[in-house]
Image: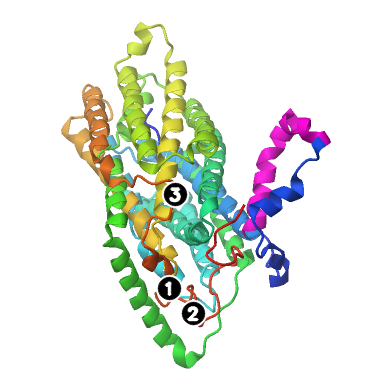
Amino acid sequence: MESLETEKLVDDEDPPSKHADYAGRVPSQLISDKQPTKGNNGARSSPFSILLEPFQWLQMLCSQLNPSFVLGVFLVYGLNQGFAGSYFKVVSDYYWKDVQRVQPSSVQLFIGLYYIPWVMKPLWGLLTDVFPVRGYRRRPYFVVAGALGAASSLAVAGSKLPVMAALACLIGLTAALAIADVTIDACIAKNSIEIRTLAPDMQSLCGFCSSAGALLGYSTSGFFVHHAGAQGALGLLAIPAAMLIVLGFMIYEIRVTHTLHSEKRMIFEKVGAAIRGMRETIRRPQVWKPSLYMYFSLALSFSTHEGQFYWYTDPRAGPAFSQEFVGTIYAIGAMASIVGVLIYQKTLKNIPFRKLLFSAQLLYGISGMLDLVFIRRWNLSFGIPDAFFVIAEECISRVISRIRWTPMIVLSAKLCPLGIEGTFFALLMSIDSLGQLSSKWGGGLVLGFMGVTRTDFHNLWLVILVRNALRFATLGLIFLVPDADQSDVLIPSDLLSKSYGLGLGSGGGEEEEGLQLSHIKGNGDIQD
């Protein structure tokens, strides 16, 4: 089964004094507080201590970063992108197939439109960076995202809408995810620059939350579709959206105070500075080359998901998987994705970008051949049941996809200059979203051209063969990826030190506007 890329579908406010304890603390200090005595060295390798490792890791992240930021990652990446995104994927597939009865090639084109809000991430990032609402730059956008998502979910679940109206509501749901994502990503990008050694850990946290949430979403999606119908099941998505509203009121953020006389002038100055900063940064070869690779690595591997989904559930041409089993397949795949996060965290985060992405892309092409084996039913010739084969295939594909995707996100975060980190990270993510949009639309066009419909799947295997050939062709672009370690500084020091007038750099003269995510000294390096 075609693996899913990152498809993109709190504490109470604490006083500043609570977070002052974290100022200047480094991992060596944190670790020294927890080092076992000499007599306890044997306990370090006990099963109990291994079980404690994730909690100690989270404790370390909370001590180096603001705890409300960590909780915000759980809510945005875990509950919304993870749970809601995976649940939405399965339920919306059945909604288009059973409620609206749309052809798979058309659904591919519709799903491509889901990525428009993600392509617009620079706009959301610009708003969060330079347009504070009542003195807050992050909180209001969480509230807006939650309100939009809840309204869209309830509208599409309330009654059967015309196709275009239903499409608008589903795009509204993805827009809510995109706005919340860019808001939390601004915090992640800022921390990745200031504490470079924690950049892989933050992406591992995001990946773990997303995968764990996806496990829950996929596990429950088939059950709700079966018992509530695809249309009614979409109403459940109002709950994760409502939690974004709660996050907007509870996450810790310093309120910015400006005089009314200078506020409008400052906003326009910030917009101009952000645009100049993005233009200057994206023109650097260190930035545009890896961005171009990330786009082509997604776009060239065009999506065949809807054609495969219709085939999986067809009672005549395909294996006729039930709604519950389809959810189970994706749920097991989500568990495999968590394994991919652990593999990256434990063994791959110190491998140079180019070497890691080359190996991951090669494995990605090889794993795509499993789709061809399944569509041709060669697995039955070897005595392998459909259910076993598709689960094994999904697990392999999801592990490889996670290993392939995570270093791309780490690379993107390290290309952002301070001061416009939210806007520029959103720009890089919008390039990735544009690649995914191209993948969906390209797949829809190829499916239509090859005559794959709701009932005719004779050429589906040929579509998958062409897709796999393009995956291998992407290896020829690996020279665009920097041959640097994942902890290296990738952009010139002059860009890294500029503030672009957004009040985040040194000497800006303004009070810090962002979330109190970390308290560090000097250049943000952590000395062991």
The amino acid marked with disc number 3 is Val
Q: Position of residue 352 (x, y in %)?
A: 41, 41
| Residue drawn at the location 64% of the way across and 56% of the way down | 26
- Which of pointers 3 and 2 lies earlier in the amino acid sequence? 3
Q: Amino acid at mark 2?
A: Gly
Whether residue 175 can be seen here: yes
Is residue 49 one of those drawn in magenta? yes
Q: Residue at x 69, y 64 (%)?
A: 12
Task: Say whether marks 1 and 2 touch (CB < 8 Å).
Answer: yes
**Could you say which is closer to the camera, residue 192 or residue 182?**
192
How packed is label 1: few (under 14 Cα within 10 Å), some, or many (20 or more)?
A: many
* Mark 1 or mark 2: whose residue is earlier in sequence: 1
Identified at 72% across, 71% down, the residue is 17
521 relative position to 17: left or right = left
Image disc number at residue 499: 1
The circle drawn on residue 507 is 2
Element assignment for label 1: loop
Amino acid marked by disc 1: Ser
Query: Which mark is on residue 410?
Result: 3
Q: Is residue 70 above or below residue 142?
A: above
Q: Residues within 10 Å of mark 2 (few under 14, many from 20)?
A: few
Q: Which residues are magenta?
A: 39-65
Front residue of this view, candidates 360 and 451: 360
First of labels 3, 1 by sequence position: 3
